[in-house]
Structures are given as structure tokens and as C-alpha cells.
Amino acid sequence: MKITDVKTYVVENPPPHFGGPYFVFIKLTTDSGVEGFGEAYCLPFRPQIVTLMMTDVCERYVIGTDPFQIERLWRVIYSSGYTQHPDLSLMGVLSAIEMACWDIIGKELNRPIHELLGGRVHEKLRSYSYLYPLDSDSVDVYVNPDLGAERAAEYVKQGFTAVKFDPVGSYSAFDPRQISLEDLDRAEEYVRKVREAVGNRCDLLFGTHGQMTTSSAIRLARRLEKYDPLWFEEPVPPENMGEMAAVAQATTIPIATGERLATKYEFARLLANRAASILQMNLGRVGGILEAKKIAGMAEAHYVQIAPHLYNGPIAGAANIQIAACSPNFLILEGIQTWKGFHADILKQPIQWEDGYVIPPIGPGLGVELNEEVAELHPYTGSELHLNPLTKPGSS
């Protein structure tokens, strides 16, 4: 079996754009007609450039190769241009390609990917969602404690047993910073009111984005400990793992991180520093499915759990599900609400969500299929990046 063709899609994610303004997908086709799909997450270029990068890498290294040779292909692409370094641009491209190869392998063998990586451990996967705004909101749910508490209670009624939020304020190109007393007060009030609204029926996931210095994060953590959050996410930027470890040592709240990291090498340093006890790899960036499985294995040996990250489309989401299903140290899975809306429309058959849990699909490969007709009806032609920090110094 050889890969003979590559096709890419940049698909606009219609309003309300939860999961980003667009999704970047790849399709690989073999000489026997088997198709595999993958998805890249959050490269720092306009998406049309990302698809050119995908095509270039495939023309250089993928076309004509055997999709079963995952390790060989991974090393060749990882070493492209004499890099051999966790470059997030190349890793996003590699992740999508590797994901598509696994989809092909599963379809060729008529097995879901998780059965090829040790077998299903979890029959259902606990999931969480950010608290998202509604068009009818008169205030910002991200920073308004009363509305946040109300929305959290609504999610619990839907079946969620964990919700995530970040009331600290915007993230900036000039972070980390010492956040203000006003920000500290608002964040504590937000957590207090959400805890009062949901009681012990729901875990609270404090989902910051590296806004704080070490000392600022410790100040906030000490305020939040009495509300017993399940985690404090990326309290400081992940580039300095020693400083993240200092936060971890100063608080009883588990530290979670990993969205901005790639490859086993970066996660090995994270574990060596004891900087986090929950790893949030994004399968569209980390290096793909096998790389994520290796990271999960390293984490298991350190009694560290995994909670795959998602703020993109459902193809990477399906890869998250495959890894979660076969990893003994799986904790919880991020979703975009209940996987409905465009996350369902872009698939031929939606991801199954029931009472707070995702049911891993039993179909071959990723267990989902991109609806290419829908993808072609929603082309994205803009130049926006997937995520955009503020570009001026400021506290909020």
C-alpha cells in the first residue's frame, strides 16, 4: 500500500465560531482507494499557508510511502530541513499527516485506532466544556461571576460534571504579568459563585492562558484553594517549566498544561520538572496519535493523568477520543459543548455524547468521516489566525 494523493481543506466554522474561526483538514488517499483524514491545530500563519506547507511536506516525504510505516515517516518529517526540534509549525503539519495515516491503517485493518494501541480501557469518556456565551447575553460570561454561575448550573443540568472558565482577563504578547487586585478579586468571586451554583456535583477547571508571573499565579492559587478546583491550567507560560514547577509546589491545586507543547521531548522535561500533574496535549499539534500515546505512557509512570485539549475541529477531537479510550491514565476530555452544531454537521456521523460522556466510536480508523460536501460549501478565505493574543501591554 502506498499513499498516492493529498487534498487539503480550510473550512470556515460558522458563528458562533466555538473552536476557532476555521478548521484545517488533510485527506490522504492510497493506491487502493483508502482515505484517511487529519487536522492541524493553531499554526501561527494564515490557513492558506498552512495548506501549502502540508502539500509541500507530503510531496517531499509522504507521497509514495507506506502509511503503516508511522515511525519512519515521523522521523523523516520531524528532521525536515535539519530541524529535529519541536517546531510548532512543522509539528502541526506532521500531526495532521500522522493522524491521517492512522485513519488509513484502521480502515485497512477494519479496526478503530484504539484497538491497535492496546485496546479500549474506558467504555465511556468523561467530558467537559468551556462556559460559552449566548447571543442573548447582556454581559460577558467569561468575566461576569453571576452569569458564569448561571451558565455553569445550566451545563450541569445537561449532564456535565466539569466546566472550564478563565475569568483572569485577556492574554497578551507581553505576558506574564502581575495581575491586578481587581483581577484577583474578580477571579476569586467567579470561582466562589460557580462553586456555590454547582456544589459538589461538578468539578471546576480554572483555565488560564499563561497570563501570570510565578508570584502572581501563587497569589491567585492561594485564594482559590478553598474552592477545590480540579486544576489550575497553564498559570504561567509553558516555556519555563521550572517556574511552572514552582507554582505546582506552592499550591494544592493540580497544575494542568500541554496545549502549547509538542513531542515527547517537551513533555519529558515537564515531567522531569514535576511541573504538572495533568497533561493536555492537543493531537493536532503534539506530533500525532502515536506520539500522544508515548506521552501518555511516560505520564502513567509518573502517576500523571492526561486530559486531551480541544479548541479546533472534530477530526482532531476524534483523535483525542481514540487516545483517551486506550490510556489507563485518562482523566477527562475537552469538547465544544456537546459536540453538536457545526462540529456535528462537518461529519457524516456526529460524535456521540450522552449525559456528560463521549462514547468512543467502534468504526474503523478515527471512527468518524469528514463530510467533504459540507467542507466544500464552507471555504474559509480570510487571513485571520486561529487564536490572537493582545499585541499591546495591558492588564486586561
Image (cartoon, rainbow, N blue to C red):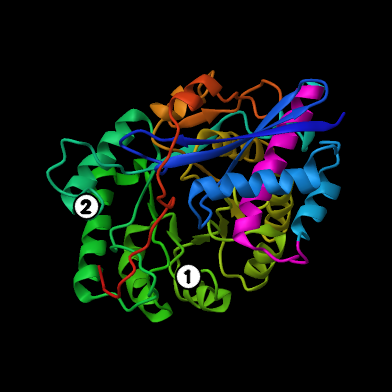
At horizontal 82% and vertical 21% (from top left) the residue drawn is 32
Q: CA distance from mark 2 to mark 1?
A: 27 Å
Query: Percent x, y for residue 228?
Result: 38, 58
The image quadrant of residue 39 is top right
Q: Which residue is mark 2?
A: 193
Q: Is residue 273 above or below residue 375?
A: below
Of badges 2 and 1, nearer the viewer stands 1
- In the displayed structure, would residue 274 be above or below residue 214? above
| Residue 134 on image: x %, y % | 23, 37
Residue 231 in view here: yes
Q: Which residue lies under the disc numbered 1?
A: 237
Residue 280: say if magenta: no
- Residue at horizontal 25 percent and vertical 41 percent from the top: 133
**Residue 190: % across, % down:** 24, 56
For badge 1, the amino acid type reads Pro
Residue 283 visible in the current orientation: no
Residue positioned 41% across, 30% down in the render: 338
Nearest the eye: 263 or 73: 73
Q: Nearer the viewer, residue 169 or 333?
A: 169
Mark 2, residues whose alpha carbon is within 10 Å: few (<14), some, or many (≥20)? some
Task: Give the prevailing secondary structure in the magenta stretch.
Answer: helix
**Which segment did they paint magenta?**
81-108
Amino acid type at image mark 2: Lys
Among numbered discs 2 and 1, the one appearing first in the sequence: 2
